Image (cartoon, grey):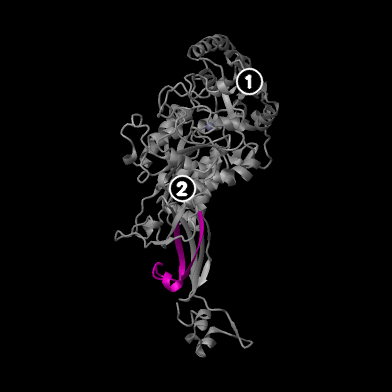
Amino acid sequence: MGKQFVGFLAIPFMAPYNVVSTELLHHSTFDALNSFDTQTARNLTEENTQNESGYAKVYTMEIPKERTRDSDIEQFVLKIDLLSASKQDDGKVTLSILVHNQEQDDLISTIKPSFEMVEDVKETSKLNTFVRMPHVSGQSIDTISGYPCYRNIDGMLAFMYELEDRASAINFLDVETIDIGDSYEKTENPNEGYDILALKITGDGVAAKGWTTNKGIVFVTCGVHAREYSPPELCARWAEILIDGYGNDTEITSLLDHTEVHMIIESNPDGRLIAETQRNLFQRKNTRPGCRFNNFLFGTPGVDLNRNFPFKWGLNSGSSSNKCDETYRGSAPASEPEVQAIIAYAETIFPESQRKDDPIEEIDEPFPEDTTIGVYYDIHSYGDLIIWPWAYEERVSGNEESLQAAARKLKSFNNYALAGPDQPAFLYPASGVTDDYFYGELGALSFTYELGTDFYQDCDTFENIIFPVNIPGFMYTAKISTKPYSLVKGPDIVETSIPSTINYHPTTKLDISITVSDSELSVGPGNYPPSTQNIASIIVCADMHPYDIDSNGNGPQIATIQVPGSPDTTKTQTILAPLSALANVLQAPLIGNHTLYLQGSDSDGYIGPVMAVSFDITCNDEASIPIFGVERECAWIASEGGCNIEQGQILCPSTCNIC
Ligand SMILES: [Zn+2]
């Protein structure tokens, strides 16, 4: 295909440019963009979204199986605004293409491969409905017009500071909103644009006990592509759940005490403002100018921040060198201030010791499972996909087993399609992307999510589907973040049953049931042997997390319970422990709240993530006890010698001084 490919590119790609540049003189969109003023834009929101002609159309093109990965097709994909590429059962690939305006519509026919483009009337109509979504009366001014479930850019940045404020009243919770750099507009003019803000969330509960622990890292970027409405909101909701749960929810408290969560909720704020106020532009990139006098062919000016990351930057497969293309990679690796800010911050978060000397030379070397920490994910929309490295070309990485094991577990929560290398849903490469950088350079177990079904996703779908199905997966990533490549292969505690309160007597038994599974969360096509083994044991610690070290350098007392019976990948184990026995392992005081930390291990020796469950031991007398038909109190029972018998002690532990 080589020669044909060159010919294909040279002729049709060159010819229309001259035509277009004269067209440009009459084109007003970018003039408007260049004199863009924040306040005006905000004021015009409703007008813009309702009065624009809304020409946008969606086309589909079917590519025969044998041509799907031809280089001319791959190059075409980089020139267009590709909404989705999906493989049919017969191997054909259907491209869904967004055409923004009449000029594009006229020109696309001159560069397209010889396959038919058919308007997708239903998708076009849906798209334009979303573009023109009317303002909802009474919706907060901090939200996107017509989309009251999404905070707008100003609302979101204010919310990050509000979360910091809220958290300052919560004991041992450490939340900071950190200015990590400037957006492109702000680097040009300090009175315009935005700060790039990182939200750091972690708990200091371990240090508060005088102990130490090695925390995991979760690093999340959202809003890298401006027009994708749901990702920043989803990230913000997770941040809020973590903050509100600290000190109230055992799992969240344990998780934050052992993890630092870092979120860049609005990674492309300049672009976001346009996407919120001029929906008909479908702004994806940042706002760096440059397309205007060049080859105005498709889309908008700006650099695609998700093609500007320095790892494997600049490949002609998976990114474009044309400033007008939606996948324009920028003039140099990390040329964009938003990308520079994210990288500079990330380099201070992920330990230098786990980086490779030469990440390109050693590209196939796996990161060690036992010593590499940190999880990264980049949240996009749309497509219901989970993507993992490599993306720059279809090629599995040295840590494919752990990456795919993790993707399958994430899928168990949201049922998204697996779209890593060698998966049916992997269709076209993308180079200079976030997750290749965070994995390749920093060692993080990395993903890209594609949420939902639209850029301007309706609030119904967001609230009822996207939000509830994705939060559990985020929690899971945090639980494995201390040692992700290893923990992900271990079994998961999938169910526990434990009484929330138990009244003290030495003979009273704590009755716990634990279900541990190495297969239940490992979903997807077929069994996945690298992370599915038989259950070997359940590991229990009380009142001290297995990763904690006390001031004498000691970790917790660990009970390993072998799981009897026939070998299986899922086992349920009941534990009956008298409180007299538990008293030896629980931290004093015995009366009060206690936490059990549970892990499973499998027959390959992999230990899974920690689950924390808590219960209260109380020392409460029964209010009154019927004795031969008369209600008696514990004082009477004690005076009659009831404390000498076990039943009396159980009913009146406080009066009988049992606890
Ligand atoms: Zn995106």
Above or below — where is 512 with respect to 315? below
Residue nearer the viewer, 63 or 203: 63
Residue drawn 51% across and 40% down? 157
Q: Amino acid at mark 1?
A: Asn
Mark 2 element type: helix
Mark 1 element type: loop
Residue 609 colored in magenta in the image: no
Point out which mark residue 495 bears: none
Q: Which residues are magenta?
A: 570-599
The answer to whether residue 376 is seen in the rendering is no
Above or below — where is 636 with respect to 286? below
Around disc 1, counting alpha carbons within 10 Å, would you say few (fewer than 14), some (14 to 19), or many (20 or more)? some
Q: Amino acid at mark 2?
A: Ala
The answer to whether residue 338 is seen in the rendering is yes
Q: Which residue is mark 2?
A: 478
Residue nearer the viewer, 10 or 2: 2
Q: Which residue is mark 1?
A: 101
Q: Position of residue 230 (x, y in %)?
A: 57, 38
What is the C-alpha distance between the residues marked 1 and 2? 43 Å
Q: Residue furthest left?
A: 552
Q: Position of residue 355 (x, y in %)?
A: 34, 37
Residue drawn 55% across and 45% down? 412
Q: Position of residue 370 (x, y in %)?
A: 36, 46
In the rendered structure, the answer to whether residue 365 lies left or right of residue 465 reads left
Residue nearer the viewer, 50 or 309: 309
The quadrant holding residue 274 is: top right
The total of numbered circles placed on residues is 2
